[in-house]
Image (cartoon, helix red, strand yellow):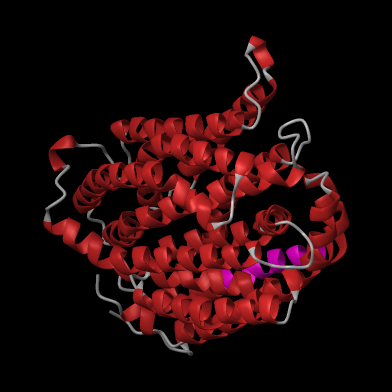
């Protein structure tokens, strides 16, 4: 395999920009549709007619359920990350037979993990709510949401793993169309159930989860249907659905660190949310939690484009390494980061200047607004490091290096974010501004480490 060098990088980067854009833009379309559905659900939960007892209650409960659902997707990364890495290598090497075997083995594991996750979510739903100090209506909404969503997660496992395979062969259009269509359905079904449109009885806040579950089920079924037809070696073949094949070991060897990384990262974010739930300052846990959840939801303006460029970088890097061109792989990572910085600048401007409008739009709770508006301006300070970190971490995973991101995230979240968040937010009574300042320090330092590590070329030497 050719080794990357400073001298070769400018030469190979000439044709890279268009390649990155051609994959990133459809992925951005997919991510944007997902983002606006989540933002819509947050807005819907903040309407006074949904939960009259407290405007922040439904926002807080739906936000907690979204956090736990995120854990499910990170567990599925045990298969999805390895799928993208191996499919992209095989596709880059021109081995479509191996592409198909990896896909089908991955789908078999998706079914097994989907069952485990669904059972876990159903049984542990009350425990998750209790850890966040939830009581009364908020607890009931969160538990109902999680238990209903458990059914959807089984089907969503097939959706995420299938999409990981599409990305491995450089097909970003199919995920955009599939998830785009499914999420449009969600945006119609959720308010229809909440308010009782089309002659239905109004469900109130429980209607939000109804739309989400239907979207997840449809996502899984549509992806499987697309794979029955097949293209670029990605064809559903039940004869290859063996969870114990040699390809399974390769998938899990790459994916296990990614799943551990994701689970530890989620644990850190969940513990961080527990810190937010215990902030003082006279506001209720629901109000602090709702302000935090709205801020994190809105931060998708930069987080999701960074993920889209990360998906593009991961696919192209894997294909380049499969073709034996490590110099091009290195250039792809750097170009993807440079292109994505514009979204960091856009997000920073929005958070610095638009926080009153953002919180005014997403909640009618004056307490939540009072907490969130000044705190959101803190987000502006670390948006450029955030997009840089995200793209480079995806680029490493595309190369098959999942241990590097694991160590970087572990050190940042547990070594910086959590202790600093507790110290500034609770001990020094810094409130939401304080805990978000701790988050800013964490992201900035992880960004610097990720930039250095990828530029060293070490991730590109990973054997998968």
Q: Give the mark count.
A: 0
Which residue sits at x=54%, y=47%? 65
Q: Which residue is drawn at 68% across and 17% down?
A: 197
Q: Is residue 298 left or right of residue 259?
A: right
Percent of width and height locating residue 354: 85, 59
Q: Is the magenta stretch mostly helix, strand or loop?
A: helix
Quadrant the N terminus occupies: bottom left
Which quadrant would residue 236 be assigned to in this image?
top left
Q: Where is residue 221 in the image (x, y as percent from the top left)?
A: 38, 31
Relative horizontal placement of residue 325, taking residue 33 as reference (left or right): left
Is 459 above or below relative to 275?
below
Measuring 79% from the left and 54% from the top, which residue is drawn there?
368
| 65 or 245, nearer to the observer | 65
- Give percent across and percent down for residue 205: 64, 32
In front of the other: 122 or 355:
122
The part of the chain drawn in magenta is: 335-350
Q: Does the magenta stretch include residue 442?
A: no
From the viewer's perspective, is 185 left or right of 324? right
Using the image, determine if residue 288 lies above or below residue 333: above
């Amino acid at each position: 395999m050719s080794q990357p060098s400073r001298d070769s990088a400018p030469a190979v980067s000439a044709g890279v920009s268009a390649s990155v854009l051609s994959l990133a833009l459809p992925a951005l379309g997919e991510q944007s549709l997902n983002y606006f559905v989540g933002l819509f659900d947050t807005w819907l939960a903040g309407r006074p007619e949904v939960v009259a007892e407290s405007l922040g209650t439904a926002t807080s409960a739906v936000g907690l359920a979204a956090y736990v659902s995120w854990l499910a997707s990170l567990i599925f990364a045990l298969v999805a990350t390895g799928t993208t890495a191996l499919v992209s290598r095989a596709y880059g090497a021109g081995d479509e037979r191996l592409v198909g075997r990896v896909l089908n083995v991955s789908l078999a594991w998706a079914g097994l993990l989907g069952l485990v996750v669904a059972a876990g979510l159903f049984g542990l739903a009350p425990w998750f709510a209790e850890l966040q100090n939830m009581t009364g209506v908020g607890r009931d909404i969160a538990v109902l949401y999680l238990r209903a969503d458990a059914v959807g997660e089984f089907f969503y496992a097939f959706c995420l793993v299938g999409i990981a395979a599409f990305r491995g062969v450089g097909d970003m259009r199919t995920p955009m169309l599939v998830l785009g269509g499914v999420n449009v359905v969600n945006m119609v079904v959720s308010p229809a159930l909440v308010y009782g449109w089309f002659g239905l009885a109004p469900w109130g806040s429980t209607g939000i989860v109804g739309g989400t579950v239907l979207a997840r089920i449809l996502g899984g079924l549509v992806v499987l249907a697309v794979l029955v037809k097949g293209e670029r070696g990605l064809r559903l073949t039940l004869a290859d659905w063996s969870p114990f094949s040699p390809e399974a070991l390769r998938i899990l060897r790459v994916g296990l660190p990614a799943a551990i990384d994701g689970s530890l990262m989620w644990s850190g974010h969940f513990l961080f949310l527990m810190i937010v739930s215990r902030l003082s300052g006279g506001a209720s846990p629901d109000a602090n939690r709702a302000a935090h959840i709205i801020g994190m939801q809105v931060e998708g303006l930069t987080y999701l484009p960074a993920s889209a460029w990360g998906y593009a970088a991961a696919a192209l890097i894997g294909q380049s390494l499969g073709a034996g061109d490590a110099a091009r792989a290195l250039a792809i990572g750097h170009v993807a980061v440079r292109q994505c910085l514009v979204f960091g600048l856009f997000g920073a401007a929005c958070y610095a200047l638009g926080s009153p409008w953002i919180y005014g739009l997403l909640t009618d709770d004056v307490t939540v607004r009072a907490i969130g508006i000044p705190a959101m301006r803190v987000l502006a300070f670390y948006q450029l490091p955030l997009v840089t970190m995200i793209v480079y971490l995806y680029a490493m995973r595309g190369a098959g290096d999942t241990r590097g991101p694991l160590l970087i995230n572990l050190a940042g979240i547990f070594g910086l974010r959590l202790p600093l968040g507790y110290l500034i937010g609770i001990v020094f009574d810094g409130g939401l501004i304080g805990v978000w300042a701790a988050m800013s320090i964490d992201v900035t330092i992880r960004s610097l480490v990720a930039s250095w590590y990828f530029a060293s070329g070490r991730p590109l030497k990973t054997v998968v």
